[in-house]
Amino acid sequence: MIVDTSVLPTDALTYTDEQFFHLVRNLCGNSSVNLLEILCIRSVQSFLLTDTKDIFSVINFDCDQLEDIKREICFQLQDKSYIIKPGVESSIKYLKELLLTKNNEHITRLKKKVTPPPPPPTLTTSSSSTTTAPTAPAVAMKQPIPMSIDDHTKYVLEKIFEWWDNNKENVLPEGFVLKENEHFTLTVTNCSANLAGLIKCKCGVITKLATKDGRFVLSNFYKHLQTLSCSMMKNIKKIYQHNRNNRNDNNVNNNDNNNNNNNDNNDNNDNNDHNDNNDNNDNNDNNDNNDNNDNNDNNDNNSNNSNSNEQPVTTSNIASTTLANHSTILQSTLLDPPSILSMSSNETSTREATKVVRVAKKKKNTTASIRTKRRKK
């Protein structure tokens, strides 16, 4: 059977997931797609590494999850056994042969690029004779050591993180870190010298990596992260904006609380100042009262001192004065009876004299106490 690989795209060997299932659907139909999908065969390389017998061995397994696919790709016999439909089996075999042929052609092209043909011999012409001298065989250029899958994976991740450090301010605000297996998934395969790399973004978009000089080129993935169609980047921007708004609100609330606390402190300080002023006023009033009392005491002392210099008033003097007044009144009464009317004024004089006696006694006692204090000093 002649297999024409022209029906396949030039990069068909790198297809995975939806691209691979789309290719199988076009060549074999939906039943073959459902069969490969339930077996988790999701790429061309995985399909080529799986034997055809293993693919159809699902009919021999007693499993509830396989009942639907059995009814779709098989005929059920009377004895409850299954037989694969010829069209499904031939389609899978054709697809396997087609992809194997494509893979062999690709390997042949790679070998031709690695081993260049030797250059033709050069001719040396002289005036006397013509000779043909073969040149030394061309030395094959040393080919670089092929990189392993781990080396390719490490190289791709280093390039992604290097690009992110240089361009993250243009994509997302500072502080966000792009992480493998959280924001994207990298898959690198190298089957039969066929290098393939895929990056699956968290939003579901799969980016196929081109190759140049045996290394992957990541420009397509960079463009995807910067487009508006990446839902992952949109969600991250929304979350960052929400968090930034919350931080701003918290800062505003903290400033308001600080202002309120400052105002309360100012009010307390004003009240304290007011109370201090009242206390000072009370102290001043007390001091004034004390000063007044001191002044009064000094005045009393001065009065006592001045009285001490005067002639002391004795009880005998007052008594003699009183008797003289009474005798005068009696004589006036005997000589002039009407003069008895003036006795009221004399009685008043008597009362005043009694008061003078009392004051004199008080002053005398005060003077004595002052002298005693001076002696003690």
Image (cartoon, helix red, strand yellow):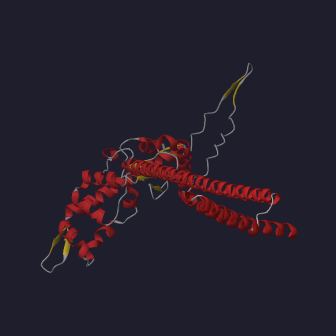
The answer to whether any part of residue 377 appears in the image is: no
Which residue, as the protein is rendered here, is positioned at the far top? 127
The image shows a total of numbered marks equal to 0
In the image, 266 versus 193, the foreground residue is 266
Q: Position of residue 1 (x, y in %)?
A: 29, 53
In the image, 357 versus 341, the foreground residue is 341
Q: Is residue 135 left or right of residue 240?
A: right
Q: Is residue 91 left or right of residue 370?
A: left
> Is 216 placed above or below 333 here?
above
Residue 76: image quadrant is bottom left
Q: Position of residue 356 (x, y in %)?
A: 68, 62
Q: Position of residue 235 (x, y in %)?
A: 38, 50
Residue shown at 70% from the left, 57% from the top: 296
The answer to whether any part of residue 65 appears in the image is: yes
Q: Position of residue 11 (x, y in %)?
A: 39, 46
Q: Is residue 93 left or right of residue 295?
A: left
In the image, 351 versus 263, the foreground residue is 351
Which residue, as the protein is rendered here, is positioned at the far front? 335
Which residue, as the protein is rendered here, is positioned at the far left? 78
In the image, 222 versus 357, the foreground residue is 357
Residue 226: image quadrant is top left
Q: Quadrant of the C terminus?
A: bottom right
Residue shown at 75% from the left, 57% from the top: 303
